[in-house]
Image (cartoon, rainbow, N blue to C red):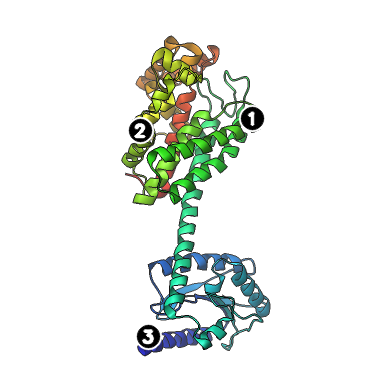
Amino acid sequence: MNSGFLNRILSAREKRQSLRISAGSSFITFNLNIPGYPKSSEYIKKAFVLLAEEVKMFFSTFFKVEEETGVDEAGHYMFIPVKEEDLKKLKKAALEFEENHVLGRLCDIDIYEKIGSSVSGSKKKKCFLCNEQAQICIKRKEHSIEELRGYCDQLLISYVKDKENNNIVDNLLYCVYSALLSEVSLHPKPGLVTRLSSGPHKDMNFFTFIKSSAVLMAGYRQMAFMALNENWTAEHRLNRMRMTGLKMEQEMLRVTHGVNTHKGAVFLLGLAIIASVRSIKDKGIIDYEFISSDIKDMTRDITAELKNIRINTHGALVFRDFGLAGARGEAEDGLPLVFNTGIPAARSIKSRLSGEELMTAVLTEIIHENNDTNIIYRGGIDHLNKVKEYAGQIIDAGFWNERSRLLYEDLCSYCNFHNLSCGGSADLLILTLYFLKLENIFGAE
């Protein structure tokens, strides 16, 4: 290493030591063992911030942590003052952290007494590249600085990427689960299960949906990581999603004892998850034009499947009888009822409505525009037209006044009496809520 760089690093370390001593208390210090120079970069900074948070959380189990962080020629550092703790106990804990963390060999956690001397540990650090003691490798010059730095860089980049990916997926799954629970909890709804009613559905209730929603999350997580870690063709993405979706449906039927609660949501949310993850990965935000286009690419000509007479799903039967493609058609068109109806309705209404009133209004807007194949399968075109007519009258009356509330109650009674279910619109409400929650975290355009 250039002697000028080395002098600057040593000077920075001496200043840190002076700061610790002048503070008049014991300290925990944390920094990264970065070979070579410079000691900081964009990814090193990201890794340090993430690791420093982990170190803080770790020592917060012993005492209240109040840290000070900084960066100098020697790299990033964190000081944690320690008042009346057992320093040897803390040193033992620090060693356990270093030994068990995936980046433990890069972590340097030291405990200093008030006078500035360090509390020694009994174990020696191992080399980054081999299992020999680090000091021995340094003395023998077993590895070049370039080898060591390259190895450390790769570890840090991988760690940051994994953390960022996990954060994306955790946030996304929160939005998925929150949307699923928000929809099923909403009461009242026309021909749909709510927290207080099963509507016309005698084989399911609120808790059936809770169990189903919970068991689906593992599959949604798998879909999200698939989208983050792979760059497959649109056709391959759809095939992988459907393979995962079939397993999810099996799990759903297992916990619900054969009741189909979320088959449509498995398909539509699966597409939405993959496309939104790709948007976040490529653009850093929720880009609705990108997502819609991506879903169109994945589902190109998917409605042609419904012509196959060997497929006897409710959606296939409605398609062959009435030419309406349901969830497949909505996906093939890029989710227009979500992006052109649900989300714009929510944005225009949220200034005066919130909570259940807002969700009910958005659901009504979707019902008015949606040729819901669930309704057609149960009652035919005439009932669909009547339901859409009700929704139009509610919208014209305005959200919410005495007339619109009475009309909405009539709509719910009509669906329950005639055994109709607005299940397709419920799925689209779930997607609308999912995207609205997601854009609050990542931003949207």
Residue 30, x across and y down, in percent: 53, 75
Sequence-wise, the earlier of marks 3 and 2 is 3
Nearer-the-camera pick, 190 or 273: 273
Q: Tell me what residue is drawn at x 49 percent, y 24 percent.
A: 423
For mark 2, give the secondary structure. loop
Which residue type does callout 3 highlight? Answer: Phe
Q: Is residue 85 left or right of residue 240?
A: right
Label disc, if present, on residue 256 of the rendered structure: 1
Residue receiving disc 2: 334
Residue receiving disc 3: 5
Q: Tell me what residue is drawn at x 39 percent, y 49 percent.
A: 280
Nearer-the-camera pick, 202 or 344: 202
Residue 134, x across and y down, in percent: 56, 81
The CA distance from mark 3 to mark 2 is 56 Å
Q: Tell me if mark 2 has few (under 14), some (14-19) or many (20+) residues whose alpha carbon lies within 10 angstroms of its own.
A: many
In the rendered structure, are the residues bearing label 3 and label 2 in contact, judged by CB atoms less than 8 Å apart?
A: no
Q: Tell me what residue is drawn at x 42 percent, y 24 percent.
A: 305
The CA distance from mark 1 to mark 2 is 30 Å
Nearer-the-camera pick, 155 or 190: 155
Which residue type does callout 2 highlight? Answer: Gly
Q: Tell me if mark 3 has few (under 14), some (14-19) or many (20+) residues whose alpha carbon lies within 10 angstroms of its own.
A: some
Which residue type does callout 1 highlight? Answer: Thr
Residue 68, x across and y down, in percent: 49, 73
